[in-house]
Image (cartoon, coloured by chain):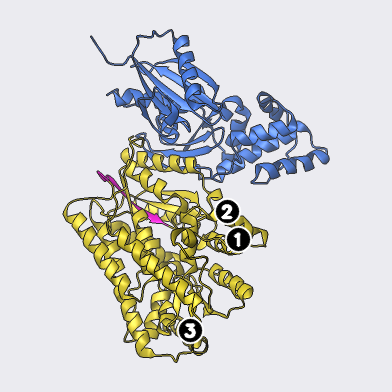
Amino acid sequence: MSEEKKPAIKKIQATGQMRKIMADYFYELDAAARDDSKKVAWCTSVGPAELLLSFGFHVYYPENHGAMLGATRMANDFIPVANAIGYSPDICSYLTSDIGSFIKKETPLSKAYEGIEGVPKPDVLVFNTNQCRDVQDWLSWYARELNVPIMGVSTFRNIGEMTDEVLAGIVQQIKDLIPKLEKISGNKFDIDKFREVLALSKKCTEMWRDVVETMVARPSPMSFFDATIHMGPAVVLRGSETAVQYYETLHAELKQRIKDGIGAVEDEKYRLYWEGMPIWGKLREMSELFIGLKTAVIPSTYCNSWIFNAFDPADPFLSMARAYTEIFIVRDENFKEKYIEDIVKRYKLDGILFHDAKTCPNNSNNRYGMPERLEKRLNIPTLTINGDLNDLRCYSEEQTRTNIEAFIEQLQAK
Amino acid sequence: MNNQPENFVGIDVGASTTKAIIINADKEILVYSVNNTGADYGAAAEKAFANACRQAGTKGSDRYLVMATGYGKRNVPRADDTKTEISCHARGAFHYFPKDHTLIDIGGQDNKIVKTDRSGKRVNFKMNRKCAAGTGAFLEEIAYRLDIKMDKLNQLAEKAQHDVHIGSYCTVFAATEILARIREGAKVEDIVKGIFGSVVKRVLEMDTMDGNVVMTGGVVAYNPFLVSMFEEKIGRKIFVPPHPQFTGALGAALYSLESKGGINA
């Protein structure tokens, strides 16, 4: 095997532009938090952000901060701080690292963006439990700590078919937010503004989908590890023209790579699915390991979770309810298996990696026999890696490496 | 002059011990060598290699082709190539048992279950999660707590007359359970059998045991009674290859031979 060759991650040129728009976003948020005439809303990453934007809120996403804590490997300094005040090491490590960082008054934002001293103080906290209950518990801590109003949408779980009743329940919950948000923002709800934001979000999400879909090409111009970084604007800047423009640039670059036959992995031999959360503190190591093994890890449930096909400005409430409820994480096992099956076939994949994230059960889909069922159904091997999104105490570098290398050796011998 | 290597070496740098095997082009095993791994993987590998060469009586001018495996495989200075211990254990086991089978390898710090089809191809594999429960390290810890030498565990377990249940996943908590059993007056041999029973449970919950079952690894080499407990649990005979501790090193040596166009077993 050639794992000892020094692998080279191919830099995506658009990264510079992404850094710039992300910096602008954080500086703008920071300024808004210091300006009494402006309002800041914290929102879960697949929460009703478009509604908040339509009211003129500057929207901050704690999960994005959680990912930054993981990627900068600061998380493990802060997780024990939250553990010590009663938040278990077994619950979401975004939550524990974020709360810990707040208590310690340290943030990766200060290191990345000179002059920013902390996360922007919220005027309202808005959640959607479509991902998990932890997001509500997370924002509830801030609600108590900062004495800030909290509200949100409680989404049904393990949904098979999207019925009218399910959607009606979500629509009503979104509408119920309006009077409270009017009061906090000081602005009346404007449906035309809401439609306008949703239309921009739709364009952003469609461009992100096109970006992700470039990975169907062989060799794939981008990897899952690149995608986890480049999805940033789809998370925090959807609903803005800036995000749309960014993805147009990125998409053009990736299309050019396809045209030139340039793959993210030199001499790509194997193609894998990544199911579950990234291991944020190990993105580079993982990326280099797979490049060395000539293996492209490409599509993922995680990066696809910010593709909201259902958005329709003509029917903003219902389409938003549908978009945020029909995502993978909310659905039942049958839906999830069919979803993965379709992608495995379309991307012509050789295997599936499941990341069993210790503190993220909702994003760890290996725990109810799915890998074994998919192996039989698709006749491809699967591998489960034990780790975590942020808590590197739950991750064994050497064991993971051995597992991955052995998995590729198994594919080679096939 | 023929420049083809004459000796094919497998070096398995495991968490606890480093094993080396030298085979010839006819797959005959010339020598086995084992020493503790310690903190210097490279030195441990060199020591195992030097011992093996000395025992085999090979000359300095002999040509070797070396395949390294195990946790320290990347630190073996003279390795021509590396392969994971999962592949090497499967390859070594298939050499002695060329049928479809489920392999259980109990190592110093990890357990592996590898399923191989009748052509010798790996179908899938599983390793224990990060926890050491059920591994050699678990037995070492408990032996230390009970102040028993590791090489005495097997004969003690054979003498057991009563079942002692050790249920915890966690090695430390298992040790606490043992303290409770001692307080209750359990005999040490019954406790040791209970510890073996814990290893059996931790391994069997990792995967299904399909068809033929093969067991390898240092723990199996020194504790045949543990194998008989597995047999009792799964209700059929288990095949243990000769020198089960060297299965990974043998697999590495075979891969080394095959990489030079040797015959695939």
Q: Residues within 10 Å of mark 2 (few under 14, many from 20)?
A: some
The reply to whether label 3 and label 1 mark residues of one chain is yes
Magenta part of the protein: which range?
A266-275
Q: Are marks 3 and 2 on the same chain?
A: yes
Q: Colour of chain B?
A: blue
Identity of the residue drawn at 40% across and 64% down: A336
Identify residue for label 1. Answer: A104
Q: Amino acid at mark 2?
A: Asp
Secondary structure of the residue carrying numbered label 2: helix
Q: Is residue A163 visible?
A: no
Q: Main secondary structure of the magenta part?
A: strand
Which residue has dot 2 on it? A77
Between the residue at mark 3 and the residue at mark 2, the CA separation in whole angstroms equals: 35 Å
Q: Which chain is yellow?
A: A
Is A272 a magenta residue?
A: yes
Q: Is residue B8 above or below residue A126?
A: above
Rounded to the nearest angstrom, the CA distance separating label 3 from label 1 is 28 Å
Q: Nearer the viewer, mark 3 or mark 2?
A: 3
Q: Is residue B110 one of those drawn in magenta?
A: no
